[in-house]
Image (spheres, helix red, strand yellow):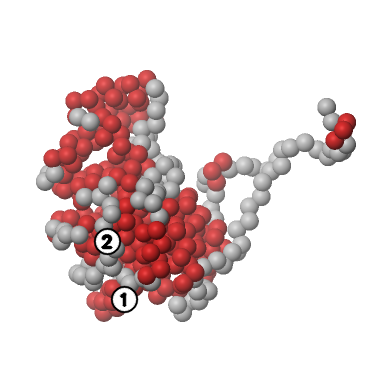
Amino acid sequence: MSQISRGLENVFIKTTSLTYIDGENGILRYGGYDIEDLVEHTSFEEVIHLMLYGDLPTKSQLQKLKSSIDESYEVPQQVIDMIYSLPKDSDAIGMMETAFSALSSLYGSPWNKNNNRENAIKLIGRASTVVANVLRAKEGKKPIIPEPSESFAKSFLKSSLSRTPSNEEVKAMDASLILYADHEVPASTTAALVTSSTLSDMYSCVVAALAALKGPLHGGAAEEAFKQFVEIGEPQNTETWFRNKITEQKSRLMGFGHRVYKTYDPRAKIFKKYAKLLSENNDNARKYFSIAQSVEDLGIKTFSEKRIYPNTDFYSGVVFYSLGFPIYMFTSLFALSRTLGWVAHVIEYVEDQHRLIRPRALYIGPLKREIVPIELRG
């Protein structure tokens, strides 16, 4: 009998040179570089070059990439108008889907090895403009085009929040972009790959990925994890909340557990460091960081025997909140970063491994039946 792999667990659909994960030992590498070293010693722009071209850039290569991003911040007015035409209470990822669908109509060029990477860089720049204006539209602020600056992270923060961010904030945003950039082939990347296998355009692949990312078990997990801290309210309420909600009601502890990692997610350790750093200057954020630490302690005490530990979404919300983003934007911030991973994977697949993805389903319904005339049916 054919084997069914529920959730496609342990099914390999491609080879990759992009991301290596050792879930047993908590190791994550992009292109052979440890995630800790990339966050500490490189920028998001350097990681873009690594993921698209296979290695970290030289100074001249980095400047060329930055110039390409700077030139791509400008998007057609029709796209901005489309974002602002949606109700303010629209789902932020849904608004991104709408914008990228429009961009697909305008820039959805056929695949071409000579242009794919440059098109991907432009897409990432446009993604920054889209996410910044999704936030501004929902907040009732005027539209804006990001201005070139020292870094992608600084330009994005300045355009989103209408203020000049501190160096610590820029570094935290840059780290967040690197940490969420790729994670092999989770649900959203798989959706992008399925779409790319039909040779649909790169922007349509991002739309498919966004649709998958929207779910609370994937991209929405950071929002759901942070909502737990808001629900707890004060640090002294943590133990009672955990006992009632997690121990007795058996509710899912959001931000804990991972399909691949059987130890502490290496990204979570880094997010925790930045959450602590940024929350020191924000009373509410400091309170939520304290709550998160208490929940983590209880969660590890309860679930460590099952090898369930904090994942990347557990502390990322505290970082995003400390930067000044509302909870409803957390998944969009994830998407802004993961856009790099999506386009890098689809380029790798289309250029080197292309085959239409067409799985099968095992039929378990009734055998052949005869149609009974409607007037004789019971």
| x and y percentages locating residue 134 in the rendered image | 34, 57
Which secondary structure, mark 2? loop
Give the camera-side residue of 98 and 89. Answer: 89
Disc ID at residue 142 = 2
Q: Earlier in the sequence, mark 1 or mark 2?
A: 1
Q: In which image quadrant can residue 131 be found?
A: bottom left
Disc ID at residue 342 = none
Residue drawn at x 26%, y 79% is: 60
Q: CA distance from mark 1 to mark 2?
A: 21 Å
**Residue denoted by label 1:** 71
Quarter of the image with the C terminus in it: top right
| x and y percentages locating residue 157 in the rendered image | 23, 59
User: Badge 2, how many Cα within 10 Å: few under 14, some, many 20+?
Assistant: few
Instruction: In the rendered view, tell whether residue 339 sits above or below residue 187.
Output: below
Q: Amino acid at mark 1?
A: Glu
Instruction: In the rendered view, tell whether residue 63 sits above or below residue 81.
Output: below
Mark 1 or 2: in front is 2
